[in-house]
C-alpha cells in the first residue's frame, strides 16, 4: 500500500512569531489540515487569541510564550510544546524583526539585536528541536526568509544581513540533514501585508519608498497576503516522502490592468 501523503497525517507543529501575520496564518492553515499546532511569540495574549480562533474552528492549538533571543525561553517553550502535543515533527521558524535604518546610522547594538532575533534565534531553535527529529528519522523545518536575499533593499541592512545568514544556515542544514529523513526548506516571500513595519511613521516610510522606487525595487502596487505565504509553508511540509522543496519563492501578483497595450 502506498504511504499516505504527509498532509493526511496528524503531525505536531510548532510555529514561531505566531502572534500575527505569516506565523498566525501558517498556524491556522496547518491546524486546518489536521496538525496540532503550538504557537510561540513574545506577545502571548495575541498568540492566545489566534489559538482561540483555531480551536473555535475545530483545530488543536496551544499558545506559549517564546523569546527566540533567550535560550532559556526557547528551552522552556520546546518542553511545553512537547508536553502539549508530543514529539515535534514540523517547525516553522518565522520569528523576525526589521529595523529600517541605513548601515552607518544604525547603533551597533541595535544591529546585533536584529541579527540575534532573525538569525541566532533560529539557530537556537533548531539546535533544541531538530536532534529529536533526526533520532526519529522524520521531520520538516521551514525557514521564512525574504526576497531581500535576492534583491537587497537600502536602509534595511541589519534585516538583509540576517536573512542572508539565515539562508546560509538553511542551505548548510540541507546538506547536513541528507539521509536523516528530516527536510529543511526555505520559503522566501516578497512584499507582504503584515504587522511588520506597520508601526513605521510616514516620515520614515516615505523616504524608504522613494529609495526603493529609485532602485527599481517596487515594480507594482501588489502585495502578498499572509495566507498566500502560509500556503507555501503548507506545501513544503505536505510534500510526499522522496520530495524536498528546498526553496519556494513567493511574490505578489501585479494588479490586473485594464489596458496592457
Image (tube, grey):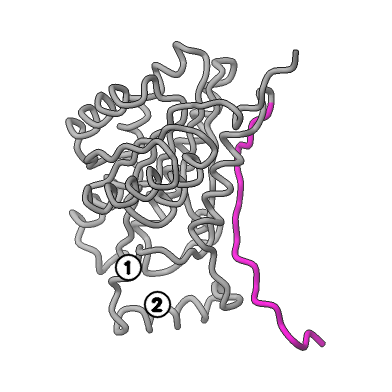
Which stretch appears magenta? 243-261
From the viewer's side, name the closer residue of 149 and 49. 49
- Write the residue at 20% across / 28% down: 76
Identify the residue at the far right of this view.
261
Residue at left offset 50%, top offset 24%? 139
Instruction: Give the CA separation, mark 1 to mark 2.
Output: 8 Å
Say which quarter of the image contains residue 2.
Answer: top right
The residue drawn where x is 43% and y is 28% is 12
Circle on res. 208 = 2
- Check the picture and name the quadrant holding the N terminus: top right
Query: Which residue is identified by label 1?
Result: 100
Q: In the figure, residue 38 lies in which quadrant?
A: top left
Q: Is residue 69 above or below residue 200?
A: above
Whether residue 12 is situated above or below residue 52 in the rendered picture = above
Q: Secondary structure at mark 1?
A: loop
Q: Residues within 10 Å of mark 1 (few under 14, many from 20)?
A: many
Side of 138 where 102 appears, left or right? left
> Magenta region, mostly helix, strand or loop?
loop
Q: Across the whole image, how many numbered discs are drawn on residues?
A: 2
Left or right of 74 on screen, residue 147: right
Instruction: State left or right for residue 218 relative to residue 126.
Output: right
245 drawn magenta: yes
Q: Position of residue 211 (x, y in %)?
A: 45, 79
Residue 156, position as x, y percentages in the image:
37, 64
Q: Earlier in the sequence, mark 1 or mark 2?
A: 1
Query: Are the residues flagged by discs 1 and 2 in contact, CB closer than 8 Å?
Result: yes
Q: Please say if 103 is above or below 145.
A: below
**Label 2, residues with CA under 10 Å away: few <14, some 14-19, many ≥20:** some
**Is 227 in the magenta?**
no
Label 2 sits on a secondary structure element that is helix
Amino acid at each position: 500500500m502506498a504511504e499516505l501523503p504527509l498532509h493526511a497525517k496528524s503531525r505536531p507543529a510548532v510555529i514561531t512569531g505566531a502572534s500575527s501575520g505569516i506565523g498566525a496564518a501558517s498556524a491556522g492553515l496547518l491546524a486546518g489540515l489536521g496538525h496540532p499546532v503550538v504557537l510561540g511569540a513574545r506577545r502571548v495574549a495575541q498568540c492566545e487569541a489566534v489559538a482561540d480562533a483555531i480551536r473555535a474552528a475545530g483545530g488543536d492549538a496551544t499558545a506559549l510564550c517564546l523569546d527566540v533571543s533567550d535560550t532559556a525561553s526557547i528551552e522552556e517553550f520546546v518542553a511545553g510544546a512537547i508536553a502539549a502535543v508530543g514529539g515535534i515533527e514540523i517547525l516553522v521558524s518565522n520569528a523576525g524583526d526589521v529595523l529600517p535604518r541605513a548601515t552607518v546610522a544604525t547603533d551597533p547594538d541595535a544591529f546585533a539585536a536584529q541579527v540575534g532575533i532573525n538569525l541566532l534565534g533560529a539557530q537556537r531553535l533548531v539546535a533544541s528541536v531538530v536532534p529529536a527529529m533526526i533520532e526519529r528519522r522524520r521531520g520538516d523545518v521551514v525557514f521564512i526568509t525574504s526576497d531581500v536575499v535576492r534583491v537587497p533593499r537600502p536602509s534595511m541592512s541589519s534585516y538583509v544581513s540576517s536573512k542572508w545568514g539565515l539562508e546560509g544556515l538553511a542551505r548548510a542544514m540541507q546538506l547536513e540533514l541528507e539521509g536523516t529523513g528530516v527536510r529543511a526548506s526555505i520559503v522566501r516571500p516578497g512584499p507582504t501585508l503584515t504587522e511588520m513595519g506597520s508601526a513605521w511613521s510616514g516620515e520614515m516610510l516615505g523616504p524608504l519608498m522613494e529609495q526603493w522606487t529609485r532602485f527599481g525595487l517596487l515594480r507594482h502596487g501588489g502585495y502578498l497576503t499572509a495566507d498566500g505565504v502560509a500556503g507555501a509553508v503548507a506545501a513544503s511540509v505536505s510534500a510526499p516522502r522522496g520530495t524536498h522543496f528546498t526553496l519556494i519563492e513567493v511574490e505578489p501578483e501585479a494588479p490586473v490592468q485594464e489596458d496592457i497595450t
